[in-house]
Image (cartoon, rainbow, N blue to C red):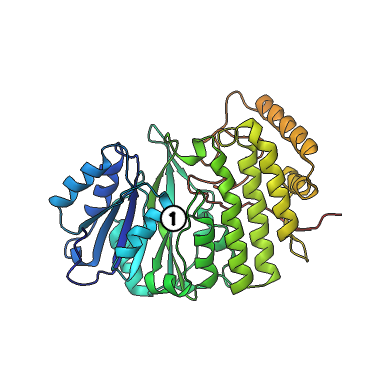
Amino acid sequence: MVNEPTHAPLLSIVVPVYGVEAYLYQCLESIRADIPAGESDAVELIAVDDASPDGCGDMLRSYAVSRDGVRVVHLSSNVGLGLARNAGLDVATGRYVWFVDSDDWLPPGTIAAVLDRLRQHQPDVLMLDHLRMHEGGRREADASSPLLRGITGVTRLADQPQLLRVQHTAWNKVVRRDFMDELELRFFPGWYEDIPFSHPLLIGAEKISVLDRVCYLYRQGRQGAITSTRSGRHFDAFAQYERLMDWVARKHPGERLQAELFELMISHYLVVVGNDGRLHPHLRRDFFHRAAAHYRRYLPTGGYPLPPGVTGLKHRLVGRGDWVAYSALRQAHRVAGRLRRPGPAVSADGGSLAADEDPGRGASAGPTRDGGLAPERRDALAVGRLP
């Protein structure tokens, strides 16, 4: 049973909850305690218990009983992150919706800054900066953060195309609810659920606002996060990219946009296939060939911006479906990396740096737990077409 608020708030914060007993209280308190005095009616917090197997359900019941403005949805069976977000969205009443993951938290002053910007700009999408938080307290700026700098007022993706390369997660965007409905966007089941959700928001938005301050603290290295879980479910990325590409083809056909998304897609696949923490060795070949099939299926007729260096070479090998050459290159890159570094390097997503994770790449040259992909820094772009 979810109690309805007496009037619609400006902002609904939806927190899907599963297996995060150790982190849940910190997340909820970082939201609730940050609501400014006199603004309690402007914010509602909706926690969705996705049939969590630990004590999260009881924690949520206890938390909501003694605190106003907190609503809890208990799901009878586990549906996964994307569909749990949908369940929260179904009962949200705010004009804007923000999806916050339950093992992350907000720094002080965030809610006031977000409310102020929403009222000032009334955007379709508000983009936020974040920090990566490692065990032991080390904070790491995201490599995509510079792409948010220097944008004042409201803008569109056509005027600031680099925004497409900011890490594409749900939690770094606050979205106008009616706009989401206009695009008919919801989350799909499976891992990497942010892929067909986040890009369309930016592509379809007429008014994008950027809040150039750290508003989100993204926990790294948690056991159970998909970036540290070996599983065949990483193959879910293919279905999610198919949904994205089909949506773009129907709603916003155009060579330039398709080329940009194509490069991001192939770079993302390369990181997944090259990361020992995500795929069992016996699955790697199959994943590579699935990526090659998508290369052939979605390659823009006019080519695409090919990354320079080793990454660009790997793109070409995917395009040729040359698993043998890719495997040899990956192994050589790994050996060279061990010779250069005295110990295991740490990638931007908190995992070990595999051969397909270029040290010069941005925050999500690999996916985060929700499949985000951040920018490739490059000095020049060459149009890539296989000979």
Where does residue 129 sit, x and y in percent of width and height? 44, 55
Q: Residue furthest right?
A: 387
Q: Would you place residue 67 above or below residue 334 in this image?
A: below
Q: Which amino acid, by three-letter code, is at mark 1?
A: Asp
Residue highlighted by disc 1:
129
Q: Residue at x 78, y 65 (%)?
A: 301
Q: Residue furthest left?
A: 66
Q: Would you place residue 214 above or below residue 120 in this image?
A: above
268 on left or right of 72: right
The secondary structure type at the circle numbered 1 is: strand
Is any part of residue 322 visible from this angle? yes
Give the quadrant of the C terminus.
bottom right
Q: Residue at x 29, y 68 (%)?
A: 94
Q: Residue at x 14, y 51 (%)?
A: 65
Observer-nearest of 238 and 129: 238
**Can you tell which quarter of the image residue 342 is in?**
top right
**Can you tell which quarter of the image residue 253 is in?**
bottom right
Where does residue 182 sit, x and y in percent of width and height? 45, 75
Give the quadrant of the N terminus.
bottom left
